[in-house]
């Protein structure tokens, strides 16, 4: 299956560079380009994009609001957003994750890493730069916020296994790694993750990670044995 990619950035040169890189891959293609968030939302719908590579800072409608609009549109439920940002550690990245972004990368990323990121997000894996995520957790996710996704009442509805899977996801493990840890299949892990997302109102795995830290289910610096 070919991954349909929408590029949203106000820099035409950057979009052109990414298009050449992506279109050279046998498993993906750029279906459209947007220069602002409003265009990104419209084109995500009209071009049936699978992944939106979204710049955070754009004119008219920025990447955070565009991500939120995509996340709130039932017709775009299958569209994933990969945020690109000049600064990986700031409150805008946290806002983008809360809005529904599946992950984020710095604009200085190596070409191969960007391609890997698109494939990971398309496969429903959260993409959170490990170093940057630790810093985000330390600076923002452990502090109370009016934008917090954590809801104590919803957390109480999770089964012990769903909480366990959510915790392991938050520590950065993939479905395969979690399956090995729990002696189950990757499909079973995905089922538990999907149920947790449904109960918590999370759009994807990245939001599960945010909720895990904001709720205190996982704490900064905590690792699994």
Image: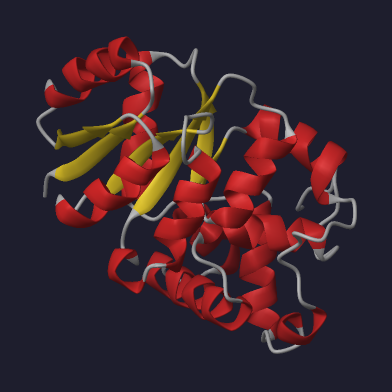
Residue 30 at x, y percent in the picture: 17, 33
- Does residue 71 appear left or right of residue 43 in this picture? right
- Does residue 165 appear left or right of residue 2 in this picture? right
Q: Residue furthest right?
A: 143
- Does residue 31 appear left or right of residue 53 in this picture? left
At 15% from the left and 50% from the top, the residue drawn is: 47
Q: Residue furthest front?
A: 60
Residue 133 at x, y percent in the picture: 69, 37
Residue 156 at x, y percent in the picture: 77, 87
Closer to the camera in the image, 91 or 169: 91
Residue 109 appears in the figure:
yes
At 85% from the left and 39% from the top, the residue drawn is: 138
Residue 197 at x, y percent in the picture: 54, 73
Q: What is the image's colouring?
A: secondary structure
Quarter of the image for residue 190 reads bottom left
74 relative to 121, above or below? below
Residue 169 appears in the figure:
no
At 38% from the left and 71% from the top, the residue drawn is: 187
């Amino acid at each position: 299956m070919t991954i349909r990619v929408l590029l949203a950035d106000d820099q035409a040169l950057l979009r052109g560079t990414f298009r050449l890189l992506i279109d050279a891959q046998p498993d993906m293609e750029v279906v459209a380009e947007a220069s602002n968030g409003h265009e990104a939302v419209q084109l995500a719908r009209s071009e049936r994009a699978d992944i939106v590579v979204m710049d955070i800072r754009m004119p008219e409608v920025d990447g955070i609001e565009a991500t939120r609009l995509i996340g709130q549109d039932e017709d775009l439920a299958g569209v994933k957003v990969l945020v690109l940002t000049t600064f990986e550690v700031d409150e805008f990245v946290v806002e983008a994750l809360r809005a529904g972004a599946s992950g984020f990368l710095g604009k200085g990323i190596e070409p191969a890493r960007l391609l890997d990121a698109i494939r990971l997000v398309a496969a429903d894996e959260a993409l959170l730069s490990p170093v940057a995520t630790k810093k985000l957790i330390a600076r923002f996710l452990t502090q109370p916020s009016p934008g917090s996704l954590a809801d104590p009442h919803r957390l109480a509805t999770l089964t012990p296994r769903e909480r366990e899977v959510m915790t392991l996801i938050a520590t950065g493990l993939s479905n395969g790694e979690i399956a090995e840890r729990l002696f189950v299949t990757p499909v079973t892990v995905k089922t538990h993750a999907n149920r947790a997302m449904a109960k918590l109102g999370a759009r994807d795995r990245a939001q599960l990670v945010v909720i895990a830290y904001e709720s205190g289910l996982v704490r900064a610096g905590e690792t699994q044995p």
